[in-house]
Image: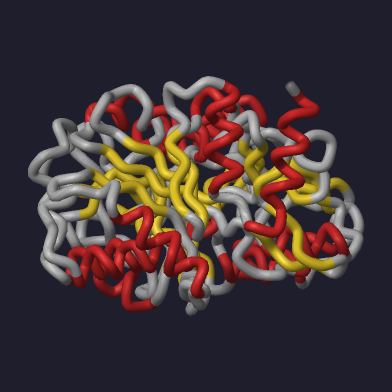
């Protein structure tokens, strides 16, 4: 049956019971108007919500009777948690979100989409992620409710037919509501001198024809800028997240996707986040294809790419090569996401590199603190194990760890630590044997 079109997010929210279960995708998939309308209600008794990477301080997550399970913390989750919200972290990488939400089988699934086209299909727009199969299952189940929020601010994007169509039909949608919500405007952070030095070190690992994976932030943006302005080219893209920086590489004529070995001719991603310019550029752009995360983040597909280079960050690295990327001081800061997937996938072929980029130190209330540490425990949890790590880069250089002994790794990491901490780290390494 065709979707029931309602006049407002509040009317769409009325299909959710005071005691209910609801799941949303990650970040750009969030139905912004619906979530705000849910926050206008005070009748919640036992509302169980599952999602990841909130893009706004939705008041629904502060209401009594509302519990939120998040697979990835962002600034909003951290603020709401620290303000007393009933928010808990679910440890899982991005690919595992799919089985988790299938097991939860929430009565309500909700997502943002592009407007229906002439044939009644709503493009999934900025997010394929891990929820697309569950959205279809929900839409086919008469005992469940599929809510779709749409407007012209969400670009119509494409998957790879025939298996991955990246769309929902109005006949499988239960509730359809048009809003004026806009996707998150995610501008890159300002770059420091240390970030610029890190980007220069990273650039030498990227060759003509390399396939790239980048995340958000000052360092990936700087690397994209250096590549856009430099002499090389012929790059490919296979990235969990498609960013404004990758768009700029396209605009500079640097991306061809000719040498990938898998998905030739297309950039593949599972979600996009950046500036309004990026969303306009993505609209009906067949050069970028959105695929489910279990494909994009699969190490086997990653390894098929020619001369693959992944660029990721961390909060700390210890002398064993263990990486903390989602906790700080024992508290949840972000999430696992695709961190380990891309570091692992880039280590399966000789011509690949995974670059782990971080500033050598940070300044906290107690003064300067090293981000190269003797041992992560117990202050931080391991996000990615030591055997997955290839190249660690700070502003002081690059430590190539793949194939190195434990002793050699420690020496290389100390060499790229902040000078103020190198003697201390050498003493610690000696005590650790």
Q: Residue at horizontal 82%, vertical 49%?
A: 329
Q: Nearer the viewer, residue 138 or 398?
A: 398
In the image, is residue 252 above or below residue 213?
below
Q: Quadrant of residue 377?
A: top right
Residue 95 location in percent, x, y? Answer: 50, 32
Q: Residue at horizontal 89%, vertical 51%?
A: 45
Would residue 245 appear left or right of 62 to someone viewing this image? left
Q: Quadrant of residue 165?
A: top left
How many numbered marks appear?
A: 0
Q: Nearer the viewer, residue 362 or 246?
A: 362
Q: Nearer the viewer, residue 156 or 217?
A: 217
Residue 38 in view (yes/no): yes
Q: Residue at horizontal 55%, vertical 59%?
A: 30
Residue 376 in view (yes/no): no
Residue 239 location in percent, x, y? Answer: 35, 46
Residue 122 location in percent, x, y? Answer: 33, 55
Q: Residue at horizontal 83%, vertical 58%?
A: 81
Residue 73 location in percent, x, y? Answer: 68, 52
For the N terminus, give its image quadrant: top left
What's the colour scheme? secondary structure
In the image, is residue 155 above or below residue 123?
below
For the C terminus, give its image quadrant: top right
Would residue 45 appear left or right of 354 to someone viewing this image? right
In the image, is residue 355 above or below residue 421?
above
Would residue 45 appear left or right of 376 to someone viewing this image? right
């Amino acid at each position: 049956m065709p979707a029931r079109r309602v006049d407002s997010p509040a009317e769409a929210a009325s299909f959710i019971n005071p005691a209910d279960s609801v799941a949303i995708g990650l970040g750009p998939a969030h139905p912004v108007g619906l979530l705000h309308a849910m926050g206008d209600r005070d009748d919640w008794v036992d509302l169980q919500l599952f999602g990841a990477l909130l893009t706004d301080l939705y008041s629904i997550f502060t209401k009594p009777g509302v519990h939120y399970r998040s697979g990835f913390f962002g600034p909003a989750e951290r603020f709401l948690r620290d303000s007393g919200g009933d928010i808990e972290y679910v440890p899982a990488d991005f690919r595992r979100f799919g089985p988790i939400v299938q097991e939860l089988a929430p009565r309500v699934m909700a997502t943002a989409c592009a407007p229906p086209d002439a044939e009644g299909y709503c493009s999934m727009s900025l997010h394929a992620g891990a929820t697309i199969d569950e959205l279809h299952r929900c839409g086919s189940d008469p005992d469940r409710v599929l809510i779709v929020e749409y407007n012209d601010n969400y670009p119509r994007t494409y998957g790879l037919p025939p298996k991955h169509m990246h769309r929902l039909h109005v006949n499988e949608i239960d509730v359809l509501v048009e809003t004026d919500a806009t996707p998150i405007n995610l501008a890159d952070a300002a770059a420091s001198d240390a970030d610029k030095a890190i980007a220069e070190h990273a650039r030498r690992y990227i060759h003509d024809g390399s396939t790239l994976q980048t995340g958000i932030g000052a360092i990936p943006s700087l690397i994209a800028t250096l590549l856009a302005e430099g002499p090389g080219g012929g790059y490919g893209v296979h990235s969990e997240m498609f960013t404004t920086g990758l768009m700029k590489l396209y605009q500079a004529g640097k991306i061809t996707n000719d040498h990938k070995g898998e998905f030739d001719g297309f950039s593949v991603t599972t979600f996009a986040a950046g500036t309004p310019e990026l969303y306009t550029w993505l609209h009906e752009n067949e050069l970028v294809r959105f695929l489910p995360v279990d494909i994009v983040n699969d190490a086997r597909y990653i390894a098929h790419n020619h001369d693959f280079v992944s660029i990721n960050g961390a909060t700390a690295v210890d002398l064993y090569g263990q990486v903390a990327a989602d906790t700080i001081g024992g508290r949840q800061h972000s999430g696992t996401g695709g961190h380990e997937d891309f570091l692992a996938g880039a280590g399966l072929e000789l011509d690949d590199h995974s670059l782990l980029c971080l500033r050598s130190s940070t300044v906290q209330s107690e003064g300067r603190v090293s981000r190269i540490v003797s041992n992560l425990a117990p202050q931080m949890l391991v996000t990615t194990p030591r055997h997955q790590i290839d190249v660690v880069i700070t502003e002081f250089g690059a430590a190539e760890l793949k194939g190195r002994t434990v002793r050699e790794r420690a020496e290389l990491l100390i060499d790229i630590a902040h000078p103020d901490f190198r003697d201390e780290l050498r003493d610690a390494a000696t005590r650790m044997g």
